[in-house]
Image (cartoon, helix red, strand yellow):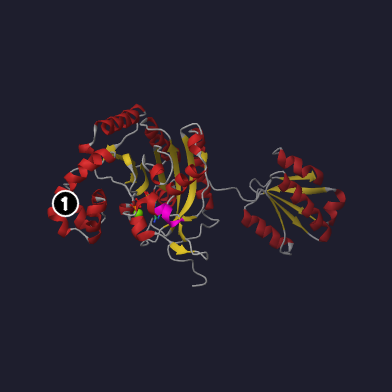
Amino acid sequence: MLTQAPKGTRDILPSEIHKWQYVERVFADICKSYGYREIRIPVFEHTELFQRGVGDTTDIVQKEMYTFLDKGGRSITLRPEGTAGVVRSYIEHGMSSLPQPVKLYYNISAYRYENIQKGRYREFHQFGVEAFGSKGPSIDVEIISMLNMFFEKLGLKNVSLNINSIGCPKCRRAYNDKLKEFLSPILKDLCDNCNARFNRNPLRIIDCKEDRCKKLTAEAPALIDNLCEECREHFEGLKAGLDNLNINYNVDKGIVRGLDYYTRTVFEFVSSNVGTQGTICGGGRYDGLVEICGGPSTPGIGFALGVERLLLEMDSQNISIPEPEGAYIFIATIGEKADRYAERLVYQLRENGISAEKDVMDRSLKAQMKYADKLGVTYTVVLGDEEIESNRAVMRNMKSGEQKDVSLDSILDRLKNNL
Ligand code: ATP
Ligand code: MG
């Protein structure tokens, strides 16, 4: 127990951190070029926020939340996703009085009590964006195009975009009746969960992951065929924008998405590789959410992308990610005087952004050189009493084998200027 991380969590080790930092950088750069600013939200919130903001007919709220009472007796939940927290922050900080749209992005850990599989963990990470204040569909196009650009920049292939519209409360009311009519006769054959959903949110039944439910509802009427005029126009506008940017998409009538408060546009980016965990990213419009959470009526749209699934996919496509450079120079020493000199020299080098190492293990010269070799440094310098006295030493380029007799004072300048 003591030496094992809890089930569903994992360490991100130094040996793989460059991959994380790389995708984080590419994502942040794209967000910046699209005018999205980073927001950091708390890891935990009042449980009620997620009950409302995610919706209590969802799997997340019904089965997956890490909820506990804190020492003050408050019900607290570890964030299972980012949207609710960002919406809470938008309201709390009066962001509706800022020029709209307010465009935010985040990079968070999230927590869900799930059955563990490849690409499905209990602690995982999401990149996400939320845009508030625009009814779209231009902003819908913008948000989807960001993801398209992200995958392109990463060199990711075989990721397809599926879009759908699930309408507004107006068209949904009419549709729900139709759907219930279809579901009534087969209800007894659907799972318990679906039966519970029937009265509260029948649309959710279409999203059930159970095979028998999937089969039985395959022919159910689709919301997209029952949209009101405005929602239809919105969807046409979205498609026209994507066409304009040459972004390929499929219309998938089956996408309902996990949150209760999605309206109109919903979309997913799915990889052809990862099986049932193939959804790398999901998003949609949530025009009612800010109001439901206690703010002014405000349209909104966003997405969340699973970073672990993204990295799994990149791995399986053998996309190489630039490895970080190790230490650049090792100052090996013999004797105390030289060691003290090296102490000052590596400080100066590091101060100038040059990655420098010296011995801190009391190793012999031979062992120091062996270690320097393992570090893969470009340069080594050996300092002893003689070198300190004469102020000269041999600087060896480990890659080319070239050796130079240099004055100690010049080492910093040489490395700074790549000489
Ligand atoms: P799924 O249908 O796979 O359970 P979801 O609809 O619950 O996904 P969202 O709530 O839309 O997922 O979260 C957005 C993204 O976050 C997903 O597309 C996925 O990449 C990632 N994600 C969700 N749950 C997990 C998890 N338990 N472990 C790792 N990544 C996850
Ligand atoms: Mg899920």
Q: Is residue 412 above or below residue 125?
A: above
Instruction: Report the side of 254 relative to 310 (left or right).
Output: left
Q: Is residue 236 above or below residue 130?
A: above
Residue 7 pos. (x, y %): 43, 65
Q: Name the residue tied to disc 1.
A: 183
Which stretch appears magenta?
46-50
Disc 1 packing (10 Å; few <14; some 14–19; many ≥20): many
Label 1 secondary element: helix
Residue 137 pos. (x, y %): 35, 31
Residue 311 pos. (x, y %): 44, 50
* Residue at the bottom extreme of this rendering: 1
Tally of marks? 1
Residue 93 in view here: yes
Residue 3 pos. (x, y %): 52, 70
298 vs 118, nearest the viewer: 298
* Residue at the right extreme of this rendering: 389
> Residue at horizontal 75%, vertical 43%?
412
Q: Is residue 370 above or below residue 266?
A: below
375 vs 26, nearest the viewer: 26
> Residue at horizontal 47%, vertical 64%?
69
Indicate the amino acid at tag 1. Answer: Leu
* Residue at the top extreme of this rendering: 244
Instruction: Report the side of 281 relative to 389 (left or right).
Output: left
Please tell me in which quarter of the rendered image ligand 2 is found: bottom left
